[in-house]
Amino acid sequence: MDHAFAFAGAHLRAMACGALHWPDQRLLVVSDLHFGKSARLARRGGALLPPYETRETLLRLDQALEVTGAQRVICLGDSFDDLQAEAELEETDRLWLIRLMAGRDWIWIAGNHDPGPGHIGGSHRSDMRLAGLTFRHMAETPGGEVSGHFHPKARLAGQSRPCFLIDGDARLILPAFGAYTGGLWCGATALDAVMGPGALAVLTGPRALPLPYAAACQSSPRSSSLAR
């Protein structure tokens, strides 16, 4: 159900759930969890959403860890919807997250929503280098770079599906893993700027579905804004 591919010498799997698995490193990578988004919107007078997105995201993360048996986790930034969101986690959600972290090497990469170090444990870094790959929140320097931030998505059979974007050995952009996250359509100016013409989109959903990036662009509405 996943899509296996080679990237800058690493053998990776784009999981249908939106996580990246590196079996040789026993590593799971997720991006843009946006824990606490509904609370942040309510606090700032925005749309009132049912406050269940953190629990749904934790459930999917729990399942991905169970399936892969990963002993190391990298969260590629925007793990919390803002710096206050970590402090406002419901106790049941906090304990669930702490249980998932227990016994694992857990790395939080800083994002634009959560630029400061948290207090929930794990390691907090601006970026990370591992076995030839560089992990950071936003695409900067091509060459074995794994990032998030853009929440890429494409349309298939009339439905919006988050997707991975893979540009040879240069860049790999992960979809947003969190519930209630918006996205940037393939073909948006910001994505075209960092993806080459031969890039691949891997759509998530019931199974991981690889498509040429150009085909994903043609099937998606043109929009330059990132719904957050």
Image (tube, rainbow, N blue to C red):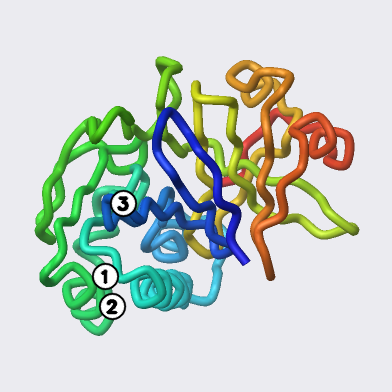
> Secondary structure beneath disc 2?
helix
Q: Which-is-in-front pick, marks 2 and 1?
A: 2
Q: CA distance from mark 3 to mark 1?
A: 33 Å
Q: Residue at x 10, y 59 (%)?
A: 121
Q: Mark 1: which amino acid?
A: Leu
From the viewer's side, name the closer residue of 111 and 85. 111
> Secondary structure beneath disc 3?
helix
Picture disc at residue 24: 3
Q: Which-is-in-front pick, marks 3 and 2?
A: 3
Residue under label 1, please give it.
89
Quadrant (top left/top right/bottom left/bottom right) for the N terminus: bottom right
From the viewer's side, name the closer residue of 104 and 178. 104
225 lies left or right of 88: right
From the viewer's side, name the closer residue of 108 and 63. 63
Q: CA distance from mark 2 to mark 1?
A: 6 Å
Residue under label 2, please give it.
93
* Residue 158, horizontal then vertical, whole percent: 89, 57
Q: Mark 3: which amino acid?
A: Asp
Q: Residue at x 51, y 43 (%)?
A: 174
**Dot 3, crowdedness within 10 Å: few (<14), some or many (≥20)?**
few
